[in-house]
Amino acid sequence: MNSPIAWQHPNTALYTDHYELTMLQAALHAGTADRRSVFEAFARKLPDGRRYGIVAGTGRLLEALPHFRFEAAQLEFLGSTGVVDDRTLAWLADFRFTGSIHGYAEGEAYFPGSPILQVEASFGEACILETLILSILNHDSAIASAASRMSRAARGRPCIEMGSRRTHEESAVAAARAAVIAGFDSSSNLEAGRRYGLKTVGTAAHSFTLLHDSEVAAFEAQTASLGLGTSLLVDTYDVEQGVRNAVAVAGNKLGGVRLDSGDLVTQAQWVRELLDDLGNTSTRIMVTSDLDEYAIAALASAPVDAYGVGTSLVTGSGAPTAGLVYKLVSREGTDGNFVSVAKAAKNKASLGGRKFALRRLDARGRATAEVVGVGAKPADDGNDRELLTTFVSGGTIQESWTGPAAVVRARQRHDASLAELPPSAHRLQRGEPVIPTEFEEETR
């Protein structure tokens, strides 16, 4: 990874919904805003047909948390528009998160009901973080879950994230980060490289070829500037002639050719044969053009060396949100003891009580179930792995969960987590979650 450069994080206090603050105001007036509470983020189900999800965004959330401050500009807006009253403005002016945050490590696989993130704090503190938490985790986990399927379908061939132009400028940075966590080799996004030390790559588009009087002239200009090891885009006009022109310019030292249109499976096969016939046995073939996990899988038998993925990746490959929700599951009662609370609405019910989670493993270290204890830790079979870790304690963010180090750590967790799952996790056919979620409720 590249060496990152410090960047100025924006204020995040108003990256929230209006009703978070009206709830705070009402709770302050009722005298309940200070009640100790436990909120949990979880998915009731996975996107239709998916077998697992991947947690991502926790590091970005922790980076945003210190900047969740109501400074003069934010307070002036809230006061002048009448969003909240003066008493609430005074509370917000002094706001600093003092609670604790626990959850699944970034890169971890998750399943329906997995307690991905837990926030324990006063109701006021935990409540106003809801939208920030969900907007980051829902987006990043959706991208990472799609990226994981793609990188597994690639079977070790490198995947390059190149979807910046297909999404919002800030979500493009987040998507690049999430993709690398979930197995992608690099990104085209330079801001992601700057912030998180990601490897960035890129050569030229069709416009560069069209700029020049001939394809040969374009290739000569590119290789003169970037070296013979560059990749040349050979399908601006005629692919076969493009390959021949590329070899004529760079010889057998040509690094690679890129194919961006047509029947990629058939095309890659005869382009490989042509390159080999011309003596370019080491020249790589990279394919792009609206790839997703299914297209990548279809190219498994083709002589392709790398995949560039854009639109499908940054839109979650059909699942643009992870579907996570954030619910109050336990809060302090009038007697000072915690009581379990739950939403009972039809089709949207939640399970009250603080959760604890284990990944149940068999004797070979293969996952067999997601075991979630309600109100108490579930029984450990002796080979199980605890899933909850501490990110914030008493308002202090723990080390190595943010910045470039967090991306490296999350990438390692992703690889280790997937290695535990049954082989059927890597099937692209629609199916149920690869392991079941089992709930163990506390007995008194």
Image (cartoon, rainbow, N blue to C red):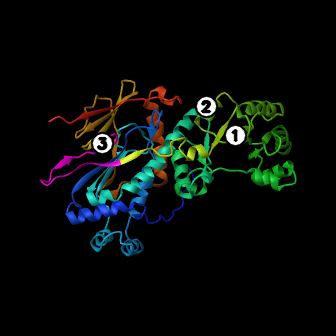
Asked if the stretch drawn in magenta spans residue 226, the answer is: no
| Residue 303 figure quarter | top right
Mark 2 or 3, closer to the camera:
3
Marks 3 and 1, how far apart at CA:
46 Å
- In the displayed orientation, state which residue is furthest to the top: 363
Q: Amino acid at mark 2?
A: Ala
Q: Secondary structure at mark 3?
A: loop
| Residue 34 figure quarter | bottom left
Q: Answer above or below: position of 132 versus 85.
A: above
Residue under pointer 3: 350
Magenta region: 326-349
Q: Is residue 401 visible?
A: no
Q: Residues within 10 Å of mark 3 (few under 14, many from 20)?
A: many
Q: Is residue 99 visible?
A: yes
Please report contact status of discs 3 and 1: CB closer than 8 Å, yes or no: no
Tell me: 127 left or right of 277.
left
Measured from the top left, where is residue 133 in percent x and y? 39, 53
Q: Amino acid at mark 3?
A: Ser
Q: In the image shown, does 321 or 423 lie closer to the viewer? A: 321
Seen at 29% across and 62% down, the residue is 24
Q: Earlier in the sequence, mark 2 or mark 3?
A: 2
Seen at 42% across and 59% down, the residue is 64
Asked if the stretch drawn in magenta spans residue 342, the answer is: yes
Mark 2 or 1, closer to the camera:
2
Residue 286 is tagged as: 1
Measured from the top left, where is residue 337 in percent x and y? 15, 50
Tell me: 264 left or right of 341.
right
Q: Secondary structure at mark 2?
A: helix
Please report contact status of discs 2 and 3: CB closer than 8 Å, yes or no: no
Residue under pointer 2: 297
Q: Earlier in the sequence, mark 3 or mark 1?
A: 1
Q: Residues within 10 Å of mark 2 (few under 14, many from 20)?
A: some
